[in-house]
Amino acid sequence: MEVKRFDVRAITNTNADRQRPYGAQERSVISLEGLGRALDEISTWPGYSRTPLVNLEGLAARMGVSKLYYKDEGKRFGLKSFKAIGGAYAVLAILQGYLASKGIAERISAADLISGKYRDMIADVVVAAATDGNHGRSVAWGAQMFGCSCIIYLHEHVSQAREREIAKYGARIVRVKGHYDDSVQQCAVDCEANGWFLAGDTSDAAGAHVPSLIMQGYTIVAEEITEDLGDTLPTHVFVQAGVGGLAAAVAAYYWEKFGPDRPDIIVVEPHRADCVYRSIAAGRPTSVPGDTNTVMACLAAGEVSAPAWIILKHSVDGVITLPEEAAPEAMRLLATGVGFDPAIVAGESGCAAVAGSIAAALNPQLKALFKLDHSSRIVVIGSEGATDEDAYQRIVGRNSETVAA
Ligand SMILES: Cc1ncc(COP(=O)(O)O)c(C=O)c1O
């Protein structure tokens, strides 16, 4: 299959500082110690296993690089995205905090909650979150698994298929007029008014605890990559961003663990929801005015999360923004595979990182800008599988099971 070129926008970060130590401020948001706690916890949940790191030799050859590894988060629990290890982890922490505050038990385990031991005490606890789809699915899944109630806020552009996937875990759905950022605001207001626990993955407060915990869960993605690659560090990691939580988790992990030897972190976003691009260009958080609606539905955020920004501002090396057609093209390319590469099921947002890496490698100027050459070892985060099956079939022309078979 032909690998197409697209007009992307790209910048490098003039505030990136490879020699800067990973300091107390960064560690207060995300830390290797917190990763250890998240891994101890999440690896005990039923169904946990490391997601595959797929070596795409055909595509790497076409791009003129040494290695291209695709981290397939479509295989994360039954939820088909990395979000499973963020939102549900926050729900667990909220319930642990609640039971401790009532003097019932200190740091009860996930297994105790799953067994139903505390069910009567937490049945009336409500967790709520706004979402483009995958985060809400994770929070609803966590609430059902651990036994509390859940309300999920969806803006008007979230598809029916995504709503169905969330509702099947027993969450009540509230639809909000407007865009993602409107649903985030409405959810926060309603939590405050009703005494619900906010399980949001973004915040405009740099010290917000829950978004940090959620990012801490995401660091498992990067740790698993290291477990698979051993001593061979990637030279570049391409990762997509909505509010920047996943990118911050990946960047923080490499920064703290490998210091100046860390790989370059390249963030990929849609043109239409380019809040990280604008913020890196301006050197401070800068929001996207107006409509952020995009085919990359889960990246449709207009504002960078403040705790994520603490990490991103000095650790992101570059940002690429994609036109709308890049994502469907990458989905079809991955579904077919290049040469002997296996077929991969990737959703509209999940394929953004690979689309960005292809765009960079096939464009001589960007190749030079991002120091890509025949010796580069690239990791791309494939952040979701077919989380919206209707959209997947419409775009790829086959259902995801057929592609995966
Ligand atoms: C599949 C997928 N990829 C990437 C992202 C971006 O994550 P973040 O909003 O933390 O930047 C999301 C967010 O919902 C997502 O669902």
Image (cartoon, rainbow, N blue to C red):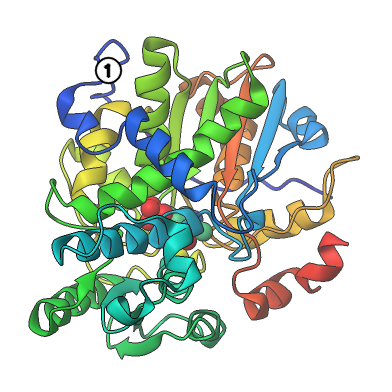
State the residue in front, 101 or 388: 101
Task: Please give left or right for residue 182 compared with residue 135 in the image.
Answer: left
State the residue in front, 110 or 130: 110
Measuring 36% from the left and 22% from the top, which residue is drawn there? Answer: 255
Q: Quadrant of residue 113?
A: bottom left
Q: Is residue 27 visible?
A: yes
Q: Is residue 304 visible?
A: no
Indicate whether 264 appears above or below 309.
above
Indicate whether 120 appears above or below 131.
below
> Percent position (x, y) of residue 261?
44, 11
Q: Quadrant of residue 380?
A: top right
Measuring 20% from the left and 51% from the top, which residue is drawn there? Answer: 209
> Percent position (x, y) of residue 86?
41, 55
* Image quarter in which the C terminus is found: bottom right
For label 1, the residue is 17
- The quarter of the image that holds ligand 1 is bottom left
